Image: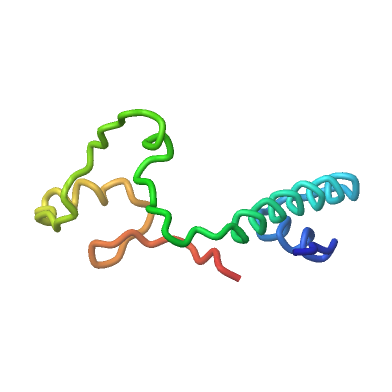
Amino acid sequence: MALTEQDIGHLARLAGLQLSSQEQQYTKQALSRILGLIEQLQAVDTTGIEPMAHPLAAHLPIALRLREDTATAGHTPDERAAHLRNAPAQHEGLFLVPTVIE
């Protein structure tokens, strides 16, 4: 994937960064290399390859400490009030945050 200066400028604005033209060139090269590596990885045929639960599991005997994926009981109203006590803004038991999506 070829990145343009406009792409880098847009990404910098989204990240709240101010990049000089030299920094933009460096960032463009670095991101292009990263995207190139991703394209290489996506090109590999993984048909019949079992997914690994841990990247080192193929090399080391690793016992993963996984918990059951089950729903847990919710918080009591007093616990919720304690969590929200320091919130700058809340509404009906939820944190209010400013909109950050353009």
Q: Quadrant of the C terminus?
A: bottom right
Which of 58/96 is in front?
A: 58
Horizontal side of residue 4 vs 15, given as left or right: right
Q: Residue furthest front?
A: 48
- Residue 44, by quadrant, is bottom right
Q: Residue at x 56, y 68 (%)?
A: 101
Which of 65/83 is in front?
A: 65
Q: Residue furthest bottom?
A: 102
Q: Residue at x 55, y 60 (%)?
A: 45
- Residue 36, by quadrant, is bottom right
Q: Quadrant of the N terminus?
A: bottom right
- Its colouring scheme is rainbow
Horizontal side of residue 7 vs 62, given as left or right: right
The x, y position of residue 84, in whole percent, is: 26, 51
The x, y position of residue 57, in whole percent, is: 37, 36
Q: Residue at x 73, y 55 (%)?
A: 12
Q: Residue at x 69, y 55 (%)?
A: 35
Which of 11/101 is in front?
A: 11
> Up-down: is 55 above or below 25?
above
The x, y position of residue 31, in whole percent, is: 73, 51
User: How many numbered marks have been drawn onto this rendered protein structure?
Assistant: 0
Horizontal side of residue 63 vs 99, given as left or right: left
Which of 14/25 is in front?
A: 25
Q: Residue furthest right?
A: 21
The x, y position of residue 41, in whole percent, is: 60, 54
